[in-house]
Image: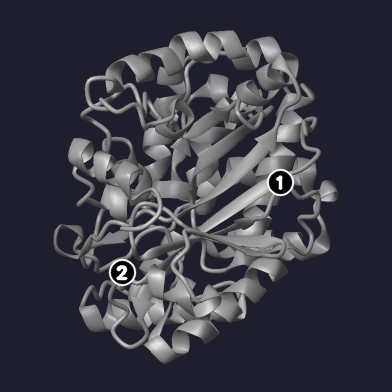
Amino acid sequence: MSYHLFEVFGIELEYMLVNKNSLKISPHVDRLMILKTGEIMSDVDNGKIEWSNELVAHVVELKTNGPTANLETLDELFAENITEINKLLLKEDLMLLPTAAHPMMLPDREMKLWEHSYSKIYALYNRIFDCRGHGWSNLQSMHINLPFFDDAEFEKLHAAVRILLPIIPALSASSPVLENKLTGFKDMRMQVYKTNQKEIPEMTGKVIPEQVFSREEYFQNIFTPIIKAVKPYDTEGILDHHFLNSRGAIARFDRKAIEIRVIDLQECPAADVAIAVLIIESLKLLAGEELVSLKDQKNWHEDDLLQIFNEVIIDAEATPIKDQRYLALFDIQGNCSAGALWQSIYQRVKNEISVKHRNILDLLFLHGSLSTRIIKALEGDLSEESITKTYRQLANCLARNEFFIP
């Protein structure tokens, strides 16, 4: 079934499986599936939410089981499933951990591929890219899937998504620590994401998608180069071009949707869904051409947008936005921070957002991105004890579906 712009949505949330006491990575999602169904499965239908595994054995993904028009209670559905999973895992001394990167994981030693369904595909990825790296095995995100009905709607949606991508990490950054060190990036997940497929650069491109606004252009400029570049590696022809495209937003013509992938996972579904709602309302504003024409949105080259993105993943909401042309898209004159830009956008769309989600967004603007709050909570102490204490608090926030305030 085909849907029109903003008629329905698909949300995906990825969580790490960890030891309840040490918080160390535990590559045993297969045990969770056995506890739930009695057998190892890569996908479990749990009513309105589906559980699945992808690539590595310590990550479980929760996603809307098909498109949904209801974002108001979606966080509660996710929270119910998280509660169920944590209860199942109690007997294994395991639990779910949020945020976009495990702060203590050593992928060279701890990465384990999923060895069940789709294992042949994952093994091929591992042969090509060597998945023992943070960019493959330690990057948990939220994906938002947005439908388009035809080329005209794809053009509007893709143009709007490209414009918004550079500043999304200012809202969502949650990966400041890797291997017990502050990385210097509030969104380190996106920093490693940019280069994790350097062997075949056609797959990720420049993260910000190219200026392509029809199905034909997309196949010609994005899919065809990917297929050609991967052919020498994929001798059995088992990889799908939709699956291979790793830009920060990807067009899924097989299901007529654009999937946004630059959003770090938060501490609880309430925060994830509130951020998703703000992103969706901001895209409606752009797609409706209330602020700027479609023509002017399409004129932006990916290099110019990437420059803003590269700065935002360092400082998130504190990043100074200096590009006056970009600020003019949102009717802002003079320099301002990425956080202030988001607050300006928020004021424009606030009336379209429910009180429930506004309460979370107000906390986000008051206390900063999750990365900012994690850094504050650590107080400069990067000992394993300090990191474990802070991330245990985040695990508790996930279990209770509560916003984290240090």
What residue lies at 76% left-to-right and 50% top-to-bottom?
68
User: Label 1: which residue?
Assistant: 346
Instruction: Assign the N terminus to one quadrant of the image.
Output: top right
For the residues labelled 1 and 2, the Cα–Cα distance comes to 39 Å
Front residue of 268 and 196: 196
Task: Say which quarter of the image contains residue 304.
Answer: top left
The vertical placement of 63 against 254, above or below, is below
What residue lies at 27% left-to-right and 34% top-to-bottom?
197
What residue lies at 29% left-to-right and 71% top-to-bottom?
25
Residue 377 screen position, x and y as percent: 39, 75
Residue 325: which numbered mark, if any?
none
The vertical placement of 172 against 283, above or below, is below
* Whether label 1 touches label 2, CB < 8 Å: no
Q: Of the residues shown, which amino acid type is indicated by label 2? A: Pro
Sequence-earlier tag: 1 or 2? 2
Q: Of the residues shown, which amino acid type is indicated by label 1? A: Tyr
User: Label 2: which residue?
Assistant: 27
Front residue of 120 and 84: 120
Front residue of 230 and 371: 230
Question: Is 283 left, or right, of 169 in this rendering?
Answer: right
What residue lies at 42% left-to-right and 56% top-to-bottom?
140
The vertical placement of 8 against 309, above or below, is below
The secondary element bearing badge 2 is classed as: loop
* Residue 59 can be seen in this image: yes
Task: Say which quarter of the image contains residue 280.
Answer: top right
* Residue 335 can be seen in this image: no
Farthest residue, direction bottom: 91
Residue 129 screen position, x and y as percent: 21, 38
At label 2, counting other C-alpha atoms closer than 10 Å, the crowd grade (few under 14, some 14-19, many 20 or more) is: many
Question: Is 195 left, or right, of 264 in this rendering?
Answer: left
Farthest residue, direction left: 109
